[in-house]
Image (cartoon, rainbow, N blue to C red):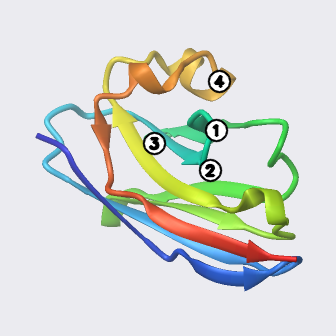
Amino acid sequence: QVHLVESGGGSVQAGGSLRLSCVASGYTYSSYCMAWFRQAPGKEREGVAAIYTGGKKTYYSRSVKGRFTISQDNAKNTHYLQMNSLKFDDTAVYYCAADAWVPKYDCYSGSWAFADFAYWGQGTQVTVSS
């Protein structure tokens, strides 16, 4: 059973930065698609970034491309979401997710939905004030 724990959320003014972390444990497979999702009140859960463990190619949604960066430290079983130039519309609960059955190409091309991910963290709140 994969266990994911996010941290790093908080409140920041527009234009500021935050870095989210997701520590994973309990891996049973050697490779996973790791993703960050977010969900604002009254909105659907949106996938914003993804990376395949051990890989370099990444996926970003149009809404965050150029401002957010996903990365990983395999030695620490941790992946990160660096969020720069934050906007009011980035306010949401952010979740990390993992799945071993999302193919590598699908992972970094964004060809997945939240239903494809079996493992989820508890979420961390990001609030951006304008």
Q: In which quadrant is the N terminus drawn?
A: top left
60 sits left or right of 98 in the view: right
Label 4 vs 1, first from the N-terminus? 1
Callout 1: 10 Å neighbours few (<14), some, many (20+)? few
Amino acid type, label 3: Gly
- Residue 64: horizontal and vertical position, in percent? 80, 49
Residue that badge 4 annotates = 110
Label 4 vs 2, first from the N-terminus? 2
Label 4 vs 3, first from the N-terminus? 3
Q: Nearer the viewer, mark 4 or mark 3?
A: 4
Residue that badge 1 annotates = 43
Callout 4: 10 Å neighbours few (<14), some, many (20+)? some
Q: Are marks 4 and 3 in contact (CB under 8 Å)?
A: no
18 sits left or right of 89 in the view: left
127 sits left or right of 30 in the view: right
Q: Are marks 2 and 1 in contact (CB under 8 Å)?
A: yes
Amino acid type, label 1: Lys
Q: Nearer the viewer, mark 1 or mark 3?
A: 1
Q: In which quadrant is the C terminus drawn?
A: bottom right
